[in-house]
Amino acid sequence: MISWNTIETVFLDMDGTLLDLHYDNYFWLKHVPIRYAEQHSLTLENAHRELMERYASVSGTMQWYCVDYWTSELGLDIERLKQEVAHLIAVHPQVVPFLEQLRAAGKRIVLLTNAHHKSLTLKMNKTGLSHHFDVLISAHSIGIPKENPAFWQQLQTLESYQPQHTLLIDDSLPVLRSARNFGIGQLLAIYQPDTQQPRKAVEDFMAIESFDQIMPI
């Protein structure tokens, strides 16, 4: 599935790729509506409806991924609310062995996420994964999300890489399309980002069920 002998750099998404997306889906679709309804004296149904509209209005932008933006917009301490359900943060099976084998194979390992720095810090503290990476990069350091084709060129200012010798593994189809258009050499999707949801369609991208399918050694 992967031509490991041609790969120098591996870009790995965080939420839905390395970590179970169930945490994020539960947080935004369940936990935030409950707290928003309490804060603003709304029914849960009305709170949910209003939030879905707000989410959709900024989907695919840096605001959608920004903890500080939602704290200001919703009148809620999003960082604190994330900590309330941090017990749901979980690493997908075989992630750690995969990262260890990437290191043994001499690949450069880059965590590349749209997540806000506060979310990134929370999840790295919870999972202990950070020491497996050469560098952790949040799109907030660049100012545009991975879905934007300009992201991949701007990324070169933080991380020098050769697109044709790079592998990106990501659960987001818009991100994978963006990377493909830029010329990232090898791309992989994730069939089940959220373990509580059915397997997803991945269009024409190759995809994996588990990282043990693509161990480099």
Image (cartoon, rainbow, N blue to C red):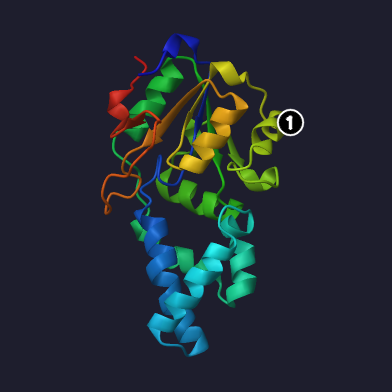
**Residue 14 x, y percent position in the rendering:** 47, 42
Q: Amino acid at mark 1?
A: Thr
Q: Is residue 79 visible?
A: no
Q: Position of residue 85 (x, y in %)?
A: 39, 64
Q: Residue at x 51, y 42 (%)?
A: 174
- Which image quadrant for residue 91? top left
Q: From this viewpoint, which residue is outermost toward the front? A: 204
Which quarter of the rendered picture does the N terminus lie within?
Answer: top left
Q: Residue at x 43, y 13 (%)?
A: 4
Residue 205: give x, y in percent of width and height.
40, 30
Residue 80, compared with residue 133, is above or below; it is below
Residue most extreme to the bottom: 41
User: Closer to the camera, 150 or 122?
Assistant: 150
Q: Residue 31 appears in which quarter of the rendering? A: bottom left
Q: Determine which quarter of the picture holds residue 182.
A: top right
Q: Residue at x 64, y 72 (%)?
A: 72
Q: Badge 1, how many Cα within 10 Å: few under 14, some, many 20+?
A: few
Q: Total of numbered circles in the picture?
A: 1
Please report the residue visible at 67 percent of the width from the left and 33 percent of the height from the top: 155
Q: Secondary structure at mark 1?
A: helix
Mark 1 = which residue? Answer: 157
**With respect to residue 111, does 77 lie above or below?**
below
* Left-right relation of 135 to 28: right
